[in-house]
Image (cartoon, rainbow, N blue to C red):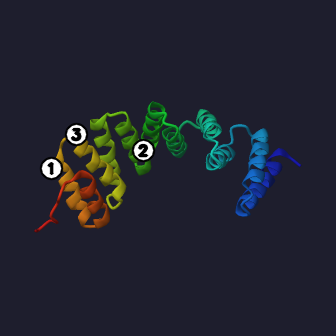
Amino acid sequence: MNPKARYLLLKWRAWYLLVLGKRSDALLLFDQMLGLSPNDDYALASRAHLRAASGDRALAIADYQDLLCAHPQNATAWFNLGFLQEECEQWRDAEQSFLRATEYDPSLDRAWYGLGLVRIRLQRYDDAVAALKRNTELQPMSPYGWYQLARVHVDRQEPDEAVKIIRHLQGFEPKVAAQLERETGLQVAPAGQ
């Protein structure tokens, strides 16, 4: 069997095993696929995902790094690498990965959110605000960016800005708005009252 046909057969078998929930067996097939095509983005990303899902973050990070050496403009891979680095508390590395993700895909809202979270951890609140504002522009109806943005404003001693966000959230995510009120001690009357 020629290498391309063998690769396609392995890919199909790996997909089938994943459908059946046999991750460890599928992982072996991704290893074989990479033996045939060491820089294959599908096999590297799939293997990294499986390793991350099984808790082997170090090997997953290594897979994403290999993937990005071969395919440096893959914004999703940069995001996934940053996500794992953030989970491992590698804040500065995660920041760089999220930045790369946003460079290659400025509309990747998850990368902007991750960038904001990492910058909060690094206590770079001005930079965190910029990233979270971009996230909320891209995902205006998602409460996560708004929540973090309000928390940063409270940490920066800007309660008026946090109040504006809580009032905004009351319009579409009242439970998140109430949670922010409890956590921050700010009492915000809904708009128009």
SS at mark 1 in the image = helix
Q: Residue at x 37, y 33 (%)?
A: 122
Image position of 18 with respect to 81: above or below = below
2 or 1: tag closer to the N-terminus:
2
Viewer-nearest of labels 2 and 1? Answer: 1
SS at mark 2 in the image = helix
Q: Amino acid at mark 2?
A: Gly
Counting from the top left corner in percent of width and height, residue 126 is at 27, 36
Q: Residue at x 30, y 59 (%)?
A: 179
Residue most extreme to the right: 1
Q: Amino acid at mark 1?
A: Asp
Viewer-nearest of labels 3 and 2? Answer: 3
Q: Residues within 10 Å of mark 1 (few under 14, many from 20)?
A: few
The answer to whether residue 34 is left or right of residue 163 is: right
The answer to whether residue 48 is left or right of residue 97 is: right
Q: Nearer the viewer, residue 149 or 42?
A: 149
Residue to which mark 1 is pinned: 160
Residue to which mark 2 is pinned: 114
Q: Residues within 10 Å of mark 3 (few under 14, many from 20)?
A: few
Q: Residue at x 39, y 45 (%)?
A: 112
Residue to which mark 3 is pinned: 156
Q: Amino acid at mark 3?
A: Arg
